[in-house]
Amino acid sequence: MTFSWSILDGRVPYSGLELRSGWVGENTGLSGDAAAGFVGPCLVPTEHLVDLDDVRAGHTIVAASMAHVIAEHPACPLALGVARQRLLVCILEEVVGLRRLRRDGDDLYLEGRKLTVSIAAPYPAGSLIHLGINVDPTGAPVPAVGLEELKLDAASVLGELLQRYARELATMAHAETKVKTVR
């Protein structure tokens, strides 16, 4: 599997509408299994959420600044998309490198404060993943922590995260090719 990624220049706001088929390609020129990383404010109103539990609860997602990843995986069933989402979050946990960081499902917390938001969602040809990492969580509707407080550079975190994710996907694909069938 070939996975490509790019980090966008400038501040790019996230409203939830960016989580759609073709957005990564439109903004990076990449096709196939690919991701875009970017930094910008986040304001996702209830009507743009895809998590039905959050919609029913009337939640919103707000932060003055987040580092975002949108990954598009064509021909990827949702169960595999969720597994890849969890892998991405586990890699982020390693990149941040704090022993006090705790993963609960697809989110990371530091001492009860939320560092991330994340969702995997189906589209007709595959799965999409959004991972938002608080940089400056001002405005968040829940107790939150950001990369600024942790003294971590958002662009550096995104670069290392996407590089490691690409490497993990490549080595997983290779692992599928180097074994013989067992009877």
Image (spheres, rainbow, N blue to C red):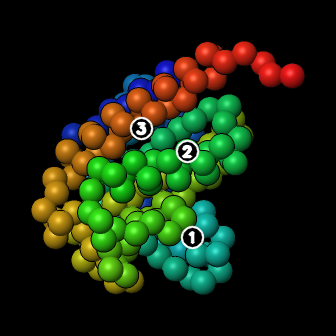
Alpha carbons under labels 3 and 2: distance apart: 9 Å
Image quarter in which the N terminus is found: top right
The residue drawn where x is 44% and y is 53% is 90
Q: In the figure, 14 relative to 170: above or below?
A: below
Q: In the displayed structure, does residue 37 sit left or right of residue 10?
A: right
The residue drawn where x is 24% and y is 68% is 146
- Dot 1 lies on which element? helix
- Dot 2 lies on which element? helix
Residue linked to disc 3: 165
Alpha carbons under labels 2 and 1: distance apart: 25 Å
Q: Amino acid at mark 2?
A: Arg
Q: In the displayed structure, does residue 152 sit left or right of residue 183?
A: left
Image quarter in which the C terminus is found: top right
Residue linked to disc 1: 47
Q: Give the mark nearer the N terminus: 2 vs 1.
A: 1
Q: Could you say where residue 49 lies in the image, as x and y percent from the top left? A: 55, 66
User: Does residue 86 appear in the picture of this structure?
Assistant: yes
Q: In the displayed structure, does residue 2 sit left or right of residue 69?
A: right
Q: In the figure, 179 relative to 80: above or below?
A: above
Front-most of residues 159 and 111: 111
The residue drawn where x is 20% and y is 45% is 156
User: Does residue 31 appear in the picture of this structure?
Assistant: no
